[in-house]
Amino acid sequence: MSAPIQSTAGEAVILDAERIERCIQRIARQILEDHHGAVRVVVAAIEGQGVVLAERIAAELRAIQAPEVLSCVIRMDKDDPLDHPVSLTDADASPFDATSLSGAVVIVVDDVLNSGRTLLHGVAHILPARPRHVGTCVLVDRIHRRFPVRADYVGQSLSTNLKDHIAVQLSGPGPDVALLKD
């Protein structure tokens, strides 16, 4: 675990654009190493910044000659996932064929692991499709879980206090960055 790169009033850069890109490359290589015999890898993004991160991981997997790589988005109400429907779509918000998950390695991706609730509900939605393996991936792990969830692939682990906020910006304006805000 490394220290934040630079500080300004009330915020510190945890990951800059260059380090985010290195994290994505490392995560993609780890996924392929762990699942070298897989026929299909499905990168399932949690709606929000997780989508951008998942798209970049999927592109990196394809660039390094992964087996078949599919992408989908898990759409849910993050504040109240039990009382609202959870759905799988493709990037264009069309329904995703859940039979593609059967026998596949599925990696559920989000930008930040905070309490673990969002990843837990995302994984729970994937399980009925009978994947061969389900893994989780986050850019920043805050290490403040209230639910029994861990990330298998992590860009940066960071112990924060409960009042701190992690903000990840992966899609304009400005450069990619992960910030710790008090």
Image: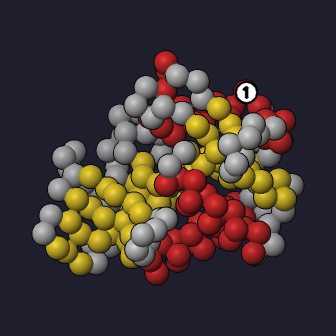
Q: Quadrant of residue 116?
A: top left
Q: Is residue 161 above or below residue 116?
A: below
Nearer to me, 87 or 25 = 87
Question: Please, what is the three-letter code of the amino acid marked with disc 1?
Answer: Pro
Left or right: residue 163 compared with residue 44: left
Residue 12: percent from the left, percent from the top? 23, 69
Query: What is the residue that sits farthest to the top in this orientation?
Result: 83
Query: Which quadrant does the C terminus fall into?
Result: bottom left
Disc 1 target residue: 128
Left or right: residue 157 compared with residue 69: left
Asked whether residue 107 appears in the rendered view, the answer is: yes
Callout 1: few (<14), some (14-19), or many (20+) C-alpha neighbours within 10 Å? few
Tell me what residue is drawn at x 32 percent, y 44 percent. Answer: 144
Colouring: secondary structure
Q: Quadrant of residue 89?
A: top right
Q: Secondary structure at mark 1?
A: helix
Q: Is residue 126 above or below residue 65?
A: above
Query: Which quadrant does the N terminus fall into?
Result: bottom left
Number of numbered markers: 1
Left or right: residue 13 compared with residue 109: left
Tell me what residue is drawn at x 20 percent, y 66 percent. Answer: 11
Residue 4: percent from the left, percent from the top? 27, 72
